Image: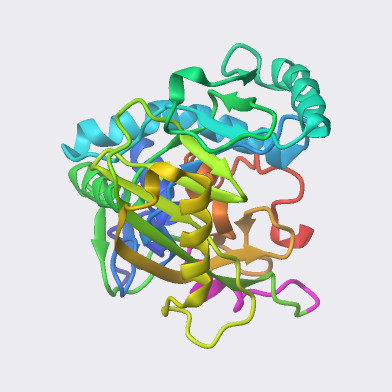
Amino acid sequence: MHTLATVDVTIRGAGVFGLCIAWACLQRGARVRVIDPAGPGAGASGGVVGALAPHVPENWNPKKAFQFDSLIMARRLWPEIEEMSGLPTGYARTGRLQPIADEAALALAQDRKAGARTHWGDAAQWDVTRAADHAPWRPHSATGQYIFDTLSAHLSPRHAVEALAKAITRLGGTICDAHADEGAVVMATGATGLAEVTNRNGTPLGAPIKGQAALLAFDAGEAAPQLFADQLHIIPHFDGTVAIGSTTERVFDDAQETDEQLDALLMRVRRAIPALAEARVIRRWAGLRPRARSRAPILGALPDQPGRFIANGGFKIGFGMAPKVGEVMAHLVLEGVDVIPEGFRVEDN
């Protein structure tokens, strides 16, 4: 006697990829269960930064186009999640400000305006400005000029994951710490699972990379843009905090421990943003992020494993990619429609 399955899709991993896939499947009427022994946002999705920022609008490729579509989708997704869950996500479209260091960088920034017009259209702008409206919330610029783009947005990872998980359960999905697989299975297991997946030659598709970040007590105001200065993301959150991140560490002893590398990062940001010189550190974060060998997310069917799929490799852009990841994986898993871009599949790595 066969027992009927109680769900159509099992998703292993309750990070932002797994949860966005669950949401997209539920939107299409599927029965969904998310399984994660550590709970929602226990891995990289439980960080503090939350930058939703695009790559530069030149040398356009499938990865940049996918990310652009996802950032546009986020404008609808996160307000929907807030409405369904009744919880804040911290999502805000206040843009991103970057100082321009010299005349060569200024000329390049001006050239990239044309690329933005071509590839972003009317959806967002890339401007060169003196950013007078944003003083004193801005880093020093040697040229006195800045790049300001309106495609960038940000959210609070912890709040966003909490709201997304609640929205999923309100829509009828289930989130639990253990259960047998039923239906189609999506492996969205992040850093803990990425190294276990190999290509046909037996080579791991990626590896975990450690990152460290910090959260400061500082209220930059609701209209403050995120900043990118000295290779640092500086994110003003809605709850009166500012996130600083992050390091990139391939060699480490303890994945969860913060150390002098985070101290150095904090010193850099205090030099770059004088307004943060006295801001108190209220949280230090360290964790592993899944970096694919291709540096693009790994999406699609697992070779030679019927009914099993993978969604991994978000690395530093997981939240920015997640809305589109959810959509394309739902199409594939539920409808058999493959719209995954070139370079994103297991066989492309």
Q: How is the image coloured?
A: rainbow
Percent from the top left, x then y, of residue 36? 34, 69
Along the line of sight, the residue nearer the viewer: 187 or 129: 129
Q: Which corner quadrant holds the N terminus?
A: bottom left
Is residue 285 among the parts visible in the rendering? yes
Q: In this picture, is 49 found above or below 235?
A: below
Region of the chain picked out in magenta, as a range: 186-201
Which is more toward the observer, 6 or 284?
284
Residue drawn at the location 27% of the way across and 38% of the way down: 238
Q: How many marks?
A: 0
**Residue 309: % across, % down:** 56, 60
> Whole-percent x and y of residue 205?
69, 70
Q: In the displayed structure, does residue 230 sit left or right of residue 72?
A: right
Quarter of the image for residue 74 reads top left
Residue in the foreground of this view, choosing between 66 and 283? 283
| Residue at 72 percent of width and 29 percent of height | 57
> Which quarter shows the C terminus?
bottom right
Looking at the rendering, which quadrant does residue 126 occupy?
top right
- In the picture as drawn, the residue positioned furthest to the bottom comes out as 253
Q: Nearer the viewer, residue 314 or 171?
A: 314
* View extreme (top): residue: 122
One can see residue 25 in this view: no
196 in magenta: yes
Q: Is residue 134 magenta?
A: no
Residue 312 lies left or right of residue 347; in this view the side is left
What residue is at 70 percent from the left and 42 percent from the top?
Answer: 63
Image coordinates of residue 82 in percent, x first then y, are 24, 35
In the image, residue 71 sits, relative to residue 36, either above or below, namely above
| Picture quadrant of residue 121 | top right
